[in-house]
Protein backbone atom coordinates (compact mmCIF):
# COMPACT_ATOMS: atom_id res chain seq x y z
CA UNK A 1 0.00 0.00 0.00
CA UNK A 2 1.39 3.45 -0.91
CA UNK A 3 1.74 6.22 1.65
CA UNK A 4 -0.96 8.24 -0.12
CA UNK A 5 -3.67 5.55 -0.02
CA UNK A 6 -6.32 5.83 2.73
CA UNK A 7 -6.17 3.34 5.58
CA UNK A 8 -9.24 2.11 7.45
CA UNK A 9 -8.97 1.98 11.24
CA UNK A 10 -11.75 0.54 13.40
CA UNK A 11 -12.85 2.95 16.13
CA UNK A 12 -14.14 1.42 19.39
CA UNK A 13 -17.47 2.30 21.03
CA UNK A 14 -16.91 4.26 24.25
CA UNK A 15 -18.88 5.50 27.25
CA UNK A 16 -17.78 8.90 28.56
CA UNK A 17 -18.67 10.77 31.76
CA UNK A 18 -17.46 14.26 32.78
CA UNK A 19 -18.27 15.74 36.18
CA UNK A 20 -17.04 18.68 38.26
CA UNK A 21 -14.74 17.82 41.19
CA UNK A 22 -13.14 19.78 44.02
CA UNK A 23 -10.54 17.49 45.62
CA UNK A 24 -7.67 17.95 43.18
CA UNK A 25 -4.16 19.35 43.33
CA UNK A 26 -3.48 22.97 42.44
CA UNK A 27 -1.11 21.62 39.76
CA UNK A 28 -2.68 19.26 37.24
CA UNK A 29 0.68 17.64 36.55
CA UNK A 30 0.77 16.36 40.14
CA UNK A 31 -1.77 13.70 39.19
CA UNK A 32 0.28 12.09 36.42
CA UNK A 33 1.44 8.52 37.07
CA UNK A 34 5.00 7.43 36.41
CA UNK A 35 4.25 5.93 32.99
CA UNK A 36 2.05 6.89 30.07
CA UNK A 37 1.02 10.36 31.19
CA UNK A 38 -0.47 12.85 28.72
CA UNK A 39 -0.44 16.57 29.38
CA UNK A 40 -1.49 19.91 27.92
CA UNK A 41 -1.23 22.78 30.41
CA UNK A 42 -0.78 26.55 30.29
CA UNK A 43 -1.07 29.00 33.18
CA UNK A 44 -2.41 26.22 35.37
CA UNK A 45 -5.31 25.33 33.05
CA UNK A 46 -5.53 22.47 30.57
CA UNK A 47 -5.75 18.68 30.72
CA UNK A 48 -3.77 15.72 31.94
CA UNK A 49 -4.64 12.11 31.27
CA UNK A 50 -3.51 8.53 31.63
CA UNK A 51 -4.49 5.08 30.51
CA UNK A 52 -5.50 4.23 26.95
CA UNK A 53 -9.18 3.90 26.07
CA UNK A 54 -8.44 4.21 22.34
CA UNK A 55 -5.35 4.82 20.28
CA UNK A 56 -4.58 5.43 16.61
CA UNK A 57 -1.09 5.11 15.14
CA UNK A 58 -0.96 6.40 11.62
CA UNK A 59 1.50 7.56 8.95
CA UNK A 60 1.44 8.41 5.27
CA UNK A 61 0.18 11.15 3.04
CA UNK A 62 -3.38 10.78 4.34
CA UNK A 63 -2.46 10.65 8.02
CA UNK A 64 -4.52 13.75 8.91
CA UNK A 65 -7.53 12.55 6.92
CA UNK A 66 -7.27 9.05 8.44
CA UNK A 67 -7.06 10.56 11.93
CA UNK A 68 -10.05 12.84 11.38
CA UNK A 69 -12.13 9.98 9.94
CA UNK A 70 -11.26 7.77 12.91
CA UNK A 71 -12.12 10.54 15.37
CA UNK A 72 -15.44 11.25 13.67
CA UNK A 73 -16.38 7.56 13.82
CA UNK A 74 -15.32 7.32 17.46
CA UNK A 75 -17.24 10.42 18.56
CA UNK A 76 -20.34 9.43 16.57
CA UNK A 77 -20.50 6.04 18.31
CA UNK A 78 -19.67 7.28 21.84
CA UNK A 79 -22.24 7.64 24.61
CA UNK A 80 -21.37 10.87 26.46
CA UNK A 81 -22.70 12.38 29.64
CA UNK A 82 -21.04 15.76 30.09
CA UNK A 83 -22.07 17.68 33.22
CA UNK A 84 -19.40 20.36 32.61
CA UNK A 85 -20.15 21.61 29.10
CA UNK A 86 -17.00 23.55 28.26
CA UNK A 87 -14.46 23.08 25.46
CA UNK A 88 -12.30 20.17 26.58
CA UNK A 89 -14.90 18.33 28.66
CA UNK A 90 -16.58 15.20 27.38
CA UNK A 91 -14.66 13.03 24.93
CA UNK A 92 -11.14 14.36 24.27
CA UNK A 93 -8.11 13.09 22.39
CA UNK A 94 -4.47 14.10 22.68
CA UNK A 95 -2.38 13.99 19.52
CA UNK A 96 1.03 14.46 17.98
CA UNK A 97 1.83 14.36 14.26
CA UNK A 98 5.08 13.82 12.40
CA UNK A 99 6.80 16.56 10.44
CA UNK A 100 6.80 14.49 7.24
CA UNK A 101 4.36 11.93 5.85
CA UNK A 102 6.76 9.15 6.79
CA UNK A 103 7.13 10.17 10.43
CA UNK A 104 4.80 8.46 12.94
CA UNK A 105 1.66 10.20 14.19
CA UNK A 106 -0.65 9.34 17.07
CA UNK A 107 -4.04 10.10 18.62
CA UNK A 108 -4.75 8.88 22.16
CA UNK A 109 -7.97 8.90 24.18
CA UNK A 110 -7.04 8.44 27.87
CA UNK A 111 -9.11 6.40 30.30
CA UNK A 112 -8.93 9.24 32.85
CA UNK A 113 -8.72 12.97 32.10
CA UNK A 114 -8.43 15.74 34.69
CA UNK A 115 -9.23 19.14 33.21
CA UNK A 116 -9.28 22.70 34.47
CA UNK A 117 -10.58 25.87 32.85
CA UNK A 118 -11.30 29.28 34.38
CA UNK A 119 -11.55 27.93 37.92
CA UNK A 120 -13.64 24.85 37.12
CA UNK A 121 -12.01 21.43 37.50
CA UNK A 122 -13.51 18.20 36.23
CA UNK A 123 -12.74 14.53 35.76
CA UNK A 124 -13.64 12.56 32.65
CA UNK A 125 -13.75 8.77 32.61
CA UNK A 126 -13.67 6.87 29.33
CA UNK A 127 -14.35 3.14 29.05
CA UNK A 128 -15.57 0.54 26.55
CA UNK A 129 -19.33 0.37 26.20
CA UNK A 130 -19.26 -3.10 27.77
CA UNK A 131 -17.47 -1.92 30.94
CA UNK A 132 -18.59 1.22 32.77
CA UNK A 133 -15.75 2.91 34.69
CA UNK A 134 -16.19 4.14 38.24
CA UNK A 135 -15.09 7.66 39.17
CA UNK A 136 -11.40 7.42 40.07
CA UNK A 137 -9.82 8.35 43.36
CA UNK A 138 -7.37 11.07 42.42
CA UNK A 139 -3.97 10.88 44.07
CA UNK A 140 -0.83 12.95 43.67
CA UNK A 141 2.58 11.66 42.70
CA UNK A 142 6.05 13.07 43.25
CA UNK A 143 8.41 12.82 40.27
CA UNK A 144 11.96 11.58 40.63
CA UNK A 145 14.67 14.19 39.99
CA UNK A 146 16.99 13.75 37.03
CA UNK A 147 20.70 13.70 37.91
CA UNK A 148 24.03 13.80 36.11
CA UNK A 149 22.81 14.63 32.61
CA UNK A 150 25.43 14.84 29.87
CA UNK A 151 24.88 16.20 26.39
CA UNK A 152 26.33 15.05 23.08
CA UNK A 153 25.99 16.00 19.43
CA UNK A 154 23.09 14.46 17.58
CA UNK A 155 23.05 13.88 13.84
CA UNK A 156 25.41 16.84 13.21
CA UNK A 157 28.09 18.68 15.12
CA UNK A 158 27.64 22.41 15.55
CA UNK A 159 30.34 23.04 12.94
CA UNK A 160 28.71 20.71 10.44
CA UNK A 161 25.32 22.30 11.02
CA UNK A 162 26.75 25.79 10.42
CA UNK A 163 28.10 24.53 7.10
CA UNK A 164 24.61 23.33 6.19
CA UNK A 165 23.24 26.79 7.00
CA UNK A 166 25.86 28.32 4.72
CA UNK A 167 24.76 25.98 1.92
CA UNK A 168 21.13 26.99 2.49
CA UNK A 169 22.06 30.68 2.28
CA UNK A 170 23.86 29.94 -1.00
CA UNK A 171 20.72 28.29 -2.39
CA UNK A 172 18.57 31.21 -1.24
CA UNK A 173 20.82 33.90 -2.71
CA UNK A 174 20.90 31.84 -5.90
CA UNK A 175 17.14 32.24 -6.19
CA UNK A 176 16.01 28.67 -5.48
CA UNK A 177 13.81 29.71 -2.54
CA UNK A 178 13.17 32.55 -0.08
CA UNK A 179 13.42 30.81 3.28
CA UNK A 180 14.16 27.41 4.79
CA UNK A 181 13.95 26.26 8.41
CA UNK A 182 16.78 23.94 9.43
CA UNK A 183 16.74 21.87 12.61
CA UNK A 184 19.37 20.09 14.68
CA UNK A 185 19.25 17.68 17.58
CA UNK A 186 21.18 17.16 20.80
CA UNK A 187 21.39 13.93 22.78
CA UNK A 188 20.78 14.02 26.55
CA UNK A 189 21.88 11.03 28.64
CA UNK A 190 21.07 10.78 32.37
CA UNK A 191 22.62 8.59 35.03
CA UNK A 192 19.27 6.83 35.61
CA UNK A 193 15.96 6.46 33.75
CA UNK A 194 14.39 9.86 33.09
CA UNK A 195 11.10 10.47 34.89
CA UNK A 196 9.37 12.67 32.29
CA UNK A 197 7.24 14.29 34.97
CA UNK A 198 10.36 16.01 36.37
CA UNK A 199 11.14 18.10 33.24
CA UNK A 200 7.41 18.63 32.65
CA UNK A 201 6.98 20.26 36.06
CA UNK A 202 10.05 22.43 35.51
CA UNK A 203 8.93 23.52 32.05
CA UNK A 204 5.44 24.44 33.27
CA UNK A 205 6.92 26.45 36.15
CA UNK A 206 9.61 28.24 34.13
CA UNK A 207 7.49 28.89 31.01
CA UNK A 208 3.89 29.41 32.21
CA UNK A 209 2.91 31.32 29.07
CA UNK A 210 3.92 28.42 26.84
CA UNK A 211 1.92 25.25 26.22
CA UNK A 212 3.57 22.43 28.17
CA UNK A 213 2.79 19.06 26.59
CA UNK A 214 3.41 15.34 26.86
CA UNK A 215 2.23 12.87 24.21
CA UNK A 216 3.73 9.39 23.89
CA UNK A 217 7.20 10.35 25.10
CA UNK A 218 7.36 13.72 23.32
CA UNK A 219 7.52 16.50 25.92
CA UNK A 220 8.15 20.22 25.71
CA UNK A 221 6.94 23.78 26.26
CA UNK A 222 6.11 25.43 22.97
CA UNK A 223 5.40 29.15 22.51
CA UNK A 224 3.78 28.75 19.09
CA UNK A 225 0.04 28.17 18.76
CA UNK A 226 -0.55 26.67 15.33
CA UNK A 227 -4.33 26.98 15.60
CA UNK A 228 -7.13 27.14 18.17
CA UNK A 229 -10.78 26.64 17.27
CA UNK A 230 -13.34 27.52 19.89
CA UNK A 231 -17.02 28.12 19.20
CA UNK A 232 -16.46 29.48 15.72
CA UNK A 233 -13.39 31.62 16.48
CA UNK A 234 -10.07 30.61 14.89
CA UNK A 235 -6.77 31.96 16.20
CA UNK A 236 -3.11 31.33 15.43
CA UNK A 237 0.07 32.78 16.93
CA UNK A 238 2.94 33.06 14.46
CA UNK A 239 6.51 33.28 15.72
CA UNK A 240 9.50 33.92 13.45
CA UNK A 241 12.52 36.06 14.22
CA UNK A 242 14.41 35.43 17.44
CA UNK A 243 16.97 37.08 19.68
CA UNK A 244 18.49 35.73 22.88
CA UNK A 245 17.87 37.52 26.19
CA UNK A 246 20.79 38.63 28.35
CA UNK A 247 19.08 38.89 31.74
CA UNK A 248 19.71 42.64 31.89
CA UNK A 249 16.30 44.32 31.55
CA UNK A 250 17.56 47.54 30.01
CA UNK A 251 19.75 45.70 27.53
CA UNK A 252 16.92 43.30 26.67
CA UNK A 253 14.59 46.21 25.91
CA UNK A 254 17.20 47.57 23.52
CA UNK A 255 17.54 44.14 21.94
CA UNK A 256 13.76 43.90 21.57
CA UNK A 257 13.75 47.23 19.75
CA UNK A 258 16.52 46.06 17.43
CA UNK A 259 14.62 42.83 16.73
CA UNK A 260 11.51 44.83 15.81
CA UNK A 261 13.61 46.81 13.28
CA UNK A 262 15.69 43.94 11.89
CA UNK A 263 15.09 43.62 8.14
CA UNK A 264 16.30 39.99 8.21
CA UNK A 265 13.93 39.00 11.02
CA UNK A 266 11.01 41.01 9.64
CA UNK A 267 11.46 39.30 6.28
CA UNK A 268 11.46 35.87 7.92
CA UNK A 269 8.40 36.81 9.97
CA UNK A 270 6.46 38.11 6.96
CA UNK A 271 6.88 34.79 5.14
CA UNK A 272 5.54 32.91 8.17
CA UNK A 273 2.52 35.18 8.69
CA UNK A 274 1.56 35.09 5.02
CA UNK A 275 1.81 31.29 5.03
CA UNK A 276 -0.65 31.03 7.93
CA UNK A 277 -3.05 33.68 6.63
CA UNK A 278 -3.21 32.08 3.17
CA UNK A 279 -3.92 28.64 4.66
CA UNK A 280 -6.67 29.88 7.00
CA UNK A 281 -8.39 32.24 4.57
CA UNK A 282 -10.52 29.53 2.85
CA UNK A 283 -11.91 28.54 6.26
CA UNK A 284 -12.77 32.07 7.48
CA UNK A 285 -15.49 34.51 6.50
CA UNK A 286 -13.48 37.34 8.03
CA UNK A 287 -9.89 37.65 9.24
CA UNK A 288 -7.68 40.04 11.18
CA UNK A 289 -3.99 39.97 10.21
CA UNK A 290 -2.02 42.73 12.00
CA UNK A 291 0.33 44.69 9.76
CA UNK A 292 3.22 44.71 12.24
CA UNK A 293 4.35 42.08 14.77
CA UNK A 294 4.88 42.53 18.49
CA UNK A 295 7.83 41.25 20.51
CA UNK A 296 7.00 38.24 22.68
CA UNK A 297 9.24 38.11 25.77
CA UNK A 298 10.07 34.63 27.08
CA UNK A 299 12.52 33.87 29.89
CA UNK A 300 15.34 32.86 27.52
CA UNK A 301 14.54 34.47 24.15
CA UNK A 302 12.37 37.09 22.46
CA UNK A 303 10.38 36.47 19.28
CA UNK A 304 8.61 38.56 16.70
CA UNK A 305 4.98 37.46 17.05
CA UNK A 306 1.70 38.03 15.24
CA UNK A 307 -1.74 36.83 16.36
CA UNK A 308 -3.94 35.98 13.38
CA UNK A 309 -7.68 35.64 14.06
CA UNK A 310 -10.70 34.71 11.99
CA UNK A 311 -14.37 33.75 12.14
CA UNK A 312 -15.02 30.25 10.81
CA UNK A 313 -17.16 29.89 7.70
CA UNK A 314 -17.25 26.08 7.61
CA UNK A 315 -17.17 23.08 9.91
CA UNK A 316 -13.43 22.39 9.74
CA UNK A 317 -12.26 20.95 13.07
CA UNK A 318 -9.21 22.16 14.96
CA UNK A 319 -7.29 19.18 13.56
CA UNK A 320 -8.56 19.90 10.07
CA UNK A 321 -7.27 23.46 10.37
CA UNK A 322 -3.93 22.19 11.69
CA UNK A 323 -3.70 19.90 8.68
CA UNK A 324 -4.33 22.86 6.36
CA UNK A 325 -1.58 24.85 8.08
CA UNK A 326 1.10 22.15 8.28
CA UNK A 327 3.86 22.68 7.39
CA UNK A 328 3.84 26.46 7.69
CA UNK A 329 6.71 28.70 6.65
CA UNK A 330 7.58 29.08 10.35
CA UNK A 331 8.89 25.50 10.51
CA UNK A 332 9.50 24.63 6.85
CA UNK A 333 10.11 27.61 4.57
CA UNK A 334 8.97 29.44 1.45
CA UNK A 335 8.02 28.20 -1.12
CA UNK A 336 7.02 25.29 1.09
CA UNK A 337 7.51 22.42 -1.42
CA UNK A 338 10.99 23.66 -2.35
CA UNK A 339 11.95 24.22 1.29
CA UNK A 340 10.66 20.77 2.27
CA UNK A 341 12.78 19.15 -0.46
CA UNK A 342 15.85 21.09 0.63
CA UNK A 343 15.35 20.01 4.25
CA UNK A 344 15.22 16.40 3.12
CA UNK A 345 18.37 16.91 1.07
CA UNK A 346 20.70 18.71 3.49
CA UNK A 347 19.33 18.63 7.06
CA UNK A 348 20.68 15.16 7.69
CA UNK A 349 18.31 13.91 10.38
CA UNK A 350 14.82 12.54 10.88
CA UNK A 351 12.70 15.07 12.79
CA UNK A 352 10.04 12.59 13.88
CA UNK A 353 7.30 14.55 15.63
CA UNK A 354 9.47 17.61 16.27
CA UNK A 355 7.91 20.66 14.53
CA UNK A 356 4.71 18.74 13.80
CA UNK A 357 1.29 19.60 15.26
CA UNK A 358 0.76 18.62 18.91
CA UNK A 359 -2.36 19.25 20.95
CA UNK A 360 -5.90 18.12 21.73
CA UNK A 361 -9.41 18.13 20.35
CA UNK A 362 -12.89 17.44 21.74
CA UNK A 363 -15.93 15.82 20.20
CA UNK A 364 -17.24 19.16 18.88
CA UNK A 365 -14.03 19.70 16.93
CA UNK A 366 -12.83 22.49 19.22
CA UNK A 367 -9.27 22.27 20.44
CA UNK A 368 -5.73 23.61 20.35
CA UNK A 369 -2.83 22.48 18.22
CA UNK A 370 0.62 23.95 18.65
CA UNK A 371 3.88 23.35 16.84
CA UNK A 372 6.06 20.89 18.76
CA UNK A 373 9.02 23.14 19.55
CA UNK A 374 11.34 23.46 22.58
CA UNK A 375 10.87 19.75 23.05
CA UNK A 376 12.52 16.38 23.49
CA UNK A 377 11.66 12.81 22.52
CA UNK A 378 12.24 10.01 25.01
CA UNK A 379 14.10 7.02 23.59
CA UNK A 380 11.77 4.00 23.90
CA UNK A 381 14.76 1.65 23.87
CA UNK A 382 16.88 3.55 26.40
CA UNK A 383 14.98 5.26 29.26
CA UNK A 384 18.08 7.27 30.19
CA UNK A 385 18.24 8.96 26.79
CA UNK A 386 16.36 11.81 25.05
CA UNK A 387 16.72 13.69 21.77
CA UNK A 388 16.35 17.45 22.13
CA UNK A 389 15.49 19.62 19.12
CA UNK A 390 15.84 23.20 17.93
CA UNK A 391 15.62 24.98 14.60
CA UNK A 392 16.16 28.35 12.95
CA UNK A 393 14.71 30.14 9.94
CA UNK A 394 17.29 30.79 7.25
CA UNK A 395 16.95 33.68 4.79
CA UNK A 396 19.37 35.51 2.52
CA UNK A 397 20.75 37.64 5.37
CA UNK A 398 21.39 34.73 7.75
CA UNK A 399 24.78 34.29 9.41
CA UNK A 400 25.64 30.62 10.14
CA UNK A 401 27.30 31.35 13.49
CA UNK A 402 24.37 33.52 14.62
CA UNK A 403 21.87 30.83 13.58
CA UNK A 404 23.83 28.20 15.56
CA UNK A 405 23.71 30.51 18.60
CA UNK A 406 19.95 30.87 18.10
CA UNK A 407 19.45 27.10 18.18
CA UNK A 408 21.58 26.90 21.33
CA UNK A 409 19.28 29.45 22.96
CA UNK A 410 16.23 27.44 21.92
CA UNK A 411 17.72 24.29 23.48
CA UNK A 412 17.99 26.01 26.88
CA UNK A 413 14.44 25.20 28.11
CA UNK A 414 14.86 21.46 27.69
CA UNK A 415 18.47 21.45 28.89
CA UNK A 416 17.53 23.34 32.06
CA UNK A 417 14.43 21.22 32.62
CA UNK A 418 16.57 18.07 32.65
CA UNK A 419 19.13 19.56 35.03
CA UNK A 420 19.36 18.51 38.66
Image (cartoon, rainbow, N blue to C red):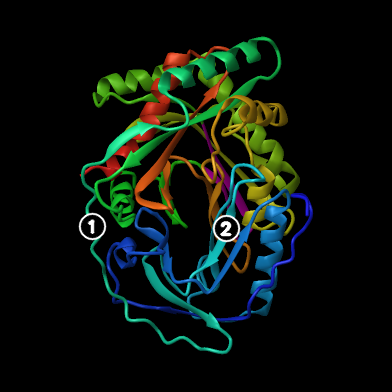
Q: Which residues are magenta?
A: 225-239
Rendered residue at 66%/53% (across/down)? 59
- Tag shown at residue 144: 1
Give the answer, above or below, for where 337 lies relative to 317. Answer: above
Percent x, y for residue 300? 33, 32
Q: Is residue 336 left or right of residue 84?
A: right
Rendered residue at 42%/53% (across/down)? 381
Percent x, y for residue 160? 47, 19
Report if the CB atoms under discs 1 and 2 are less than 8 Å apart: no
Percent x, y for residue 13? 63, 80
Percent x, y for residue 143? 25, 59
Question: Which of the 4 quarters of the picture holds residue 56?
Answer: bottom right
Residue 81 visible to the viewer: no
Q: Main secondary structure of the magenta part?
A: strand
Query: Viewer-proximal residue, 48 or 176?
Result: 176
Q: Which residue is mark 2?
A: 106
Amino acid sequence: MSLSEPVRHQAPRLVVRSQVVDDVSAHLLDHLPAEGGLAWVRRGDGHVGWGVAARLDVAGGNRFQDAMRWWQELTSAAVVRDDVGVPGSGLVCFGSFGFTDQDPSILVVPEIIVGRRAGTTWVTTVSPASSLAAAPELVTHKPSPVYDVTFADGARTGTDWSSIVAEAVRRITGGELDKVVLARDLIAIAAQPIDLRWPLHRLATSYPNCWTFSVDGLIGATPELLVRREKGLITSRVLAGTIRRTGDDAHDLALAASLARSSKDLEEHEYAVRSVADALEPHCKSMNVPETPFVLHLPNVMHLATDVAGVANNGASALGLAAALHPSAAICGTPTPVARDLIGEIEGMQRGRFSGPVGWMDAAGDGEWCIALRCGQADPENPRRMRLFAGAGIVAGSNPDAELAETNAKLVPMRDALGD
